[in-house]
Structures are given as C-alpha cells and as structure tokens.
Amino acid sequence: MMAAKFLLRRAVPALRHARCYADAPAAQMSFTFASPTQVFFKEASVKQIDVPTLTGAFGILPAHVPTLQVLRPGVVTVFNDDGSSTKYFVSSGSVTVNADSSVQLLAEEAVPLDSLDLTTAKANLEKAQSELVGVSDEAARAEVLISMEASEAIVKALE
Amino acid sequence: MFARTSAAVFLPQCGQVRNMATLKDITIRLKSIKNIQKITKSMKMVAAAKYSRAERSLKPARVYGTGTMALYEKAEIKAPEDKNKHLIIGVSSDRGLCGAIHSSVAKAMKREIAKLSGAGKEVMIVNVGDKLRGLLYRTHGKHILINCKEVGRKPPTFMDASVIATELLDSGYEFDQGSIVFNRFRSVISYKTDEKPLFSLDTVASSENMGIYDDIDADVLRNYQEFALVNIIYFGLKESTTSEQSARMTAMDNASKNASEMIDKLTMTFNRTRQAVITKELIEIISGAAAL
C-alpha cells in the first residue's frame, strides 16, 4: 500500500488508471484557492492543479494522497473540467490535500500570470542581483535572495 | 408685599428642592447636547463607511480563514489534555465608543484564564489592541506576554498579522496549545465572541490522524504551522474590525437618537420656562399697576 501511494505520487499521470485503492476514487475535488485579499476558487471542481512546492513541483488530481506542502515562488496551473487552464503566479503559501479530496491552496500573494510584465520582472531581477553583491547583514541577505528567487521565477514563467 | 411675605414663609421649607433652572442654564445645556448629537451623527457615518469597506474585504478573508482551519477540522486534531502551557490571543482594538466589543473579549479571556489557572496550567496572553491591555493589566498583568498598539486606525493587512505572529514566535514562549478570542461578525446588528483553537507544532505532528498525510518532514510542517498561525490571526483581525465598526455604528446611532430625545425634552422645558418667566413678569407688572 505504501509502495502504491509512493508510485501514485511520483508518477500520477501515467498511473491514474492503475491505482489500487479499494474504494472508488472521489469523483470530485473541492478546490479552494485564495489569497488574503482575493478568492480565485471556492470549493470548485477542477480536473488537476500543478503546484510549485519547496520539495518540487507536482500535480494534484482528485483522490490524491493527503499531504501538506509549502509553496515556493512559481506558477500554479489550474486545469478546469472543460479542459481550459489558467495560470497564476504565487509568492508563497501552503497547500493542503485532505483525505476527502478537498484541496486548500492558500497563497500569500497570487496574481493571474497575464497581469505580470516581463520587462519589469527582468529589471527587478537585475536590481536584486546587484543588491546581493553589496549586502552583508544576514537578514538583509536573506531578503535579497528571496526577492531574487521570486523575480527569477516570474521571468521564467513569463518567457 | 403679600407676595414677598409669602416668599419669606415658604423659602425654608423649599430649601431642599432644586431651584428651577434658569433660561440661561437650559440654553447652554441645549447647545451642548446639539453639538454632541452632531458629533455622534458624523461618527456614525464614518463608522458606516469603514464598515462597508471592512465587510467587503471580509468575504475573501473568510474563505482564506476557513481554508486554513480546514486541516485542523478534517484531521480532527485535538490537543492532549495534560499539556501545561497555554496561550490566549485576544483581538480587539485601540478605540472605544463601540459598545461591548472590548469588554466581551476581555470577559471571555478572563473566564479562560480563571479556568486554566484553576486547573494548574500556565497561561500567557497576547493583547492585540490597547483597550484590552487597559482592561486586563491590573488584574491579570502577570499573564501578559505581548501588547499590540495602533490597531484599528487602518484596516488590518496580512502584514500586520505576520508582524504579530513573528513577535509571538520570537518571544520564546513555547506554548503547547492556545486559542484566539475575537468577535465574529454575524450581521450589521449582531456579532458573537468566538474562540478558535491554535495548535503547536508538537501537537500537530503527534496527532494520530496526521499519519495519513504523506511525505511531511519537520521543516515543512514548521513552515506550514507558522503560515497557518499568521492566517488565523489575520482572519481574527478581519472579523474583529468588521464587528467593531458595525457595533460603533449602532452605538453612535443610539447616542444620536438619545440626544435628539433629550433635545426634544429640553426644548419643551425651555419653552415652558420661557412662558413662565413672561407670565411672571406680566403678573408683576399687573399687580404693580393694580397696587397704584
């Protein structure tokens, strides 16, 4: 059972039809995606969600193994039931997959990808890189590294 | 002459009775109450504007807050009974004139502290809002861990919640279990003082249902817990400000209504007094003229 869970998490798309749960998979996933100021999805039913986490990016489908993860700056892709997909950029946050197939994706800041500007992102990245050279204090260094990581992720997402 | 002697006879017996207010006194009082009514009316409108803004931003914050607490509810995490270190976060604000907002939170906190201290546990409290500090520091001063000021002037942001959470985590108080007490907004005219649980890292990690959650290491769980703490504080702040603004609106509305009642009564008294003065003068003139 543990092996099956492990395989399921690592190679979800391929093994989707070969899972060995005794009961039928939950047909619907109740997806809640929100930031402190905006709600994108509230208990909606979607097909798949790709999330970038600290331990790597993975996709979540209905009846995914329950897990808790912390997000890193990156792109969240939501595949709706009708086949369309929307991308959002998240700065950080957490994702919870519960046993009843409900997923809570709470992002500290999240914006739709098309509201981000590539040139501004590149300028931010360069500014952060130049700041990194000059900074010495531990806390300030960590802040600059974080802003660099976020800017890099934005640039990569937009290209 | 007859009137004067009767006055000399009556005065000692009427010594205890308050003299009827002169016209000047009533005028002064009327003016001051009218000013107060203007102020409370404008405070009500300001509170109404702030309330509508707060309620609009409460909608996404509620989804966010319930999403955060979903894990704890679905995994049915319960704190073990024998843990000793407790934490209570009370969420209120700095400003008064909002009805029973601050006192209801303080009452709930005092009740909790009494219950926990009676059971021999150690309790520390975090006051978000100066009013709570004022209500609690005299009797429960030794339980206070952190006080937060400048709350309630501007709408709360995620940044504020994270500042509070950072202070709490940096304070070094390793609580085993806690709760956050705030006023949950129900409607424009009603709110309820609610309590939501906070769990420590150890409680969550050792809870039996956590086993079904796959691939969690200590670092991830700690990050997750800290983020959840900020989220819950943010949720409490948002609900609390909305309740506070609606309560202030109600309180100022009642104050304006009471002020207009008093103005009506005083205007009546003023007119009656004015008529009595005129009548008295007329009587004096007539009796003076009749005596001639």
Image (cartoon, rainbow, N blue to C red):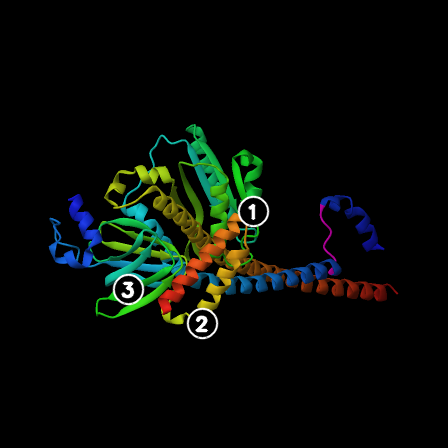
Q: CA distance from mark 1 to mark 2?
A: 48 Å
Q: In this figure, which residue is indicated by the disc labeled 2?
A: A119
Q: Position of residue B211 (x, y in %)?
A: 25, 41
Neighbour class for label 2 at 10 Å: few (<14), some, many (≥20)?
Answer: few
* Image point (36%, 56%), residue name: A106
* Image point (45%, 37%), residue name: B111
Reply above or below: B290 against B83: below
Q: Are marks 1 and 2 on the same chain?
A: no
Q: Which residues are magenta?
A: B17-23
Mark 3 and 2 residues: CB-CB less than 8 Å, in contact? no
Q: In this figure, which residue is indicated by the disc labeled 1?
A: B131
Residue A37 seen: no
Residue B7 falls left or right of residue B169? right
Q: Position of residue A91 (x, y in %)?
A: 40, 59
Tell me the quadrant of the picture where the C terminus of chain A can be found: bottom left
Lower position in the chain sequence, tag 3 or tag 2? 3
Q: Nearer the viewer, residue A86 or A152?
A: A152
